[in-house]
Amino acid sequence: MKKNNKDLDPSVAPNVTGLMNALHKPLRKSERKQRAKKTVKSEIKNRNFPPGGLNQLQIPVEEGLQWAKELTAKDFQDESVWRKFSQYLYCSLYTHMCNGMKYSSIYLFVYLFIIIIIIIIIIIIMIMIMIIAR
């Protein structure tokens, strides 16, 4: 039922505003804490772009391209190199996908095909090394 404003007791209003302020203060405090925890790394983890946008994400990936090109089969025997290369691979796929970002879908297909072939060759070499080591 609809109540008239005449039914409201004006003495209740200060209690309600005090309650609202008491509830709003911890909320503002938690919002400040969340903003303080925001970093570029956390924003990327949450799939939000940093202030520089996609270009800021692509620059470090493109800088690491020379390192990835110079790797040899022996380098992949070291687990830390393999992990770093895997991280680099996933980052490059994320930042350079064809969804209207940087490269066309044809280029991406060729890029993925070459990477898959390289990974298969590395796995074969590692299996051969394991067999020879026995």
Image (cartoon, rainbow, N blue to C red):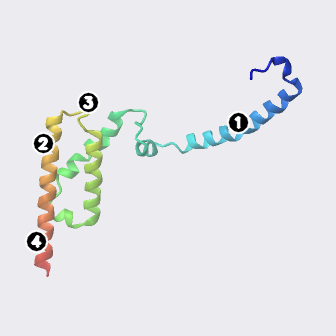
Q: Earlier in the sequence, mark 1 or mark 4?
A: 1
**Quadrant, the N terminus:** top right
From the image, tell me which residue sits under label 4.
Answer: 128
- Tell me the CA gap for discs 2 and 1: 54 Å
Give the image location of residue 36, x and y in percent: 57, 42
From the image, tell me which residue sits under label 2.
Answer: 110
Numbered disc in front, either 1 or 4: 1
Disc 1 marks a residue whose amino acid type is His
Q: Are marks 2 and 3 in contact (CB under 8 Å)?
A: no
Q: Farthest right residue?
A: 11
Q: Earlier in the sequence, mark 2 or mark 1?
A: 1
From the image, tell me which residue sits under label 1.
Answer: 24
Disc 3 marks a residue whose amino acid type is Gly
Residue displayed at 85% across by 29% down = 12
| Badge 2 density bin: few <14, some 14–19, many ≥20, Cα 10 Å | few
Indicate which disc residue 100 carries.
3
Secondary structure under badge 2? helix
Q: Earlier in the sequence, mark 2 or mark 3?
A: 3
Q: Earlier in the sequence, mark 4 or mark 2?
A: 2
Whether residue 73 is visible: no
Q: Is residue 111 above or below residue 51?
A: below
Disc 4 marks a residue whose amino acid type is Met
Q: Earlier in the sequence, mark 1 or mark 3?
A: 1
Disc 2 marks a residue whose amino acid type is Val
